Image (tube, rainbow, N blue to C red):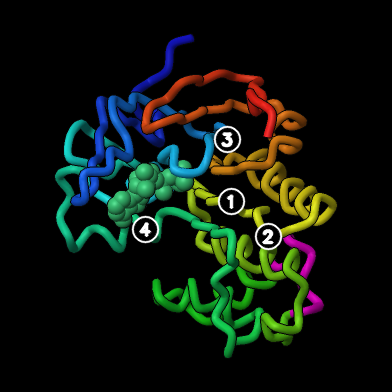
Amino acid sequence: MQHKATDRIIFMHNVAKTYENGAIALKNINVSIRKGEFVFLVGSSGAGKSTFIKMLLREVVPDEGNIFVNGYNIMEMNHRDIPYLRRSLGVIFQDYRLLPNKTIYENVAFAMQVIEAPRRTILRSVNSVLDVVGLRDKYKCFPNQLSGGEQQRVAIARAIVNKPSLVIADEPTGNLDPETSWGIMDIFHRINRLGTTIVMATHDKGIVDTMKKRVIAIENGTIVRDEYNGGYGYET
Ligand code: ADP
C-alpha cells in the first residue's frame, strides 16, 4: 500500500537513547505510524516502552536519529513550541493524575481553560466528552468519590476534550480489574473508530490478544516484532 508522507502521525528513524548513567534505553528504532492506527506497545519491564512514550512527548530527547510527531520535528524543535506539541496530544497514565481538589467537570474543563477556549465552548465540549465516557451525571463529584475505572474515564475525557489527533496511553488499565479494563478499552475503540490514532503501552495480554491490533514489541531497547493483527507474543 502506498501512503503519503502526511499520513504519518509518528515517524522515527534510527532513534537511540542512552541515559546519563549509561543505561541504553532504546537503539535503532524505526517506526512509522499512520493517522487512525491503533497500536499496542508491549514488552517486559525495562524494555524501553516509557522512554519511547516520553520521546513522543519530548520529555526525553534522543541522542540520535529523527522523530516527527504530529508534524513536529522533535529533534530540532524550538523550546517555545513544546507546549503546542503537548497540547496536540492526549495523554493518559496508569495513575489517572486528576486534580484532587477539582470536580470532574473542572478537571476536564481545565484542559480547555489553558488553551483559553471560550466559556460556552468549554461547557459544550466538557458535557460532550463526559457523555462519551458515560460520566455526565458525576460531573459534580471529586476524584476520590469515583472508582478507579471512573477516574480513568475522566482522564480519557480530559485527554480527548481538545480533539487531539493522537492519544498516548501508558498502561491505562494497569490498576484496574479485567471487567473495568474492558470498559476502558471499549472507549478507546470508539475514539479510534472516530479517527483518533491511539498508541497504548500495556502488559495486558488478554486485551492485546483479543483486540488484534498492530503490536510493536520492544525488548532490551529494540523493536523485536511489529505486526498487524498481532498478539502479545509470550506468556506472562
Ligand atoms: P519500560 O517502560 O519498558 O519499563 P523504560 O523506558 O522505563 O522501560 O526503561 C528502559 C531502560 O532505561 C531501563 O534499563 C531503565 O532502567 C532505564 N531508564 C529509564 N529511565 C531512566 C532514567 N531516567 N535514568 C536512567 N536510566 C533510565
* The CB of the residue at mark 4 lies under 8 Å from ligand 1: no
Residue 19 in sight from this viewpoint? yes
Along the line of sight, which residue is nearer the eye, 225 or 32?
225
Check if mark 3's residue and mark 4's residue have beta carbons within 8 Å. no
Q: Is residue 120 magenta?
A: no
The residues bearing labels 2 and 1 have C-alpha atoms spaced at a distance of 8 Å
In the rendered image, the quadrant that contains the C terminus is top right
Secondary element at tag 4: helix
Q: Nearer the viewer, mark 3 or mark 1?
A: 1
In this picture, residue 142 sits left or right of residue 23: right
Q: Which residues are magenta?
A: 130-138
| Sequence-wise first label, 1 or 4 | 4
Residue carrying label 3: 40
Residue carrying label 2: 175
The residues bearing labels 2 and 3 have C-alpha atoms spaced at a distance of 17 Å
**Disc ID at residue 171:** 1
Amino acid under disc 2: Asn
The local crowd at label 3, few if under 14, some if 14 to 19, many if 20 or more residues have their Cα within 10 Å, is many
| Sequence-wise first label, 2 or 3 | 3
Magenta stretch prevailing secondary structure = helix
Residue 179, x across and y down, in percent? 84, 52
Q: Nearer the viewer, mark 1 or mark 4?
A: 1
In the rendered image, the residue lying farthest to the right is 179
Whether 32 is drawn above or below 73: the answer is above
Q: Is residue 137 magenta?
A: yes
Residue carrying label 4: 86
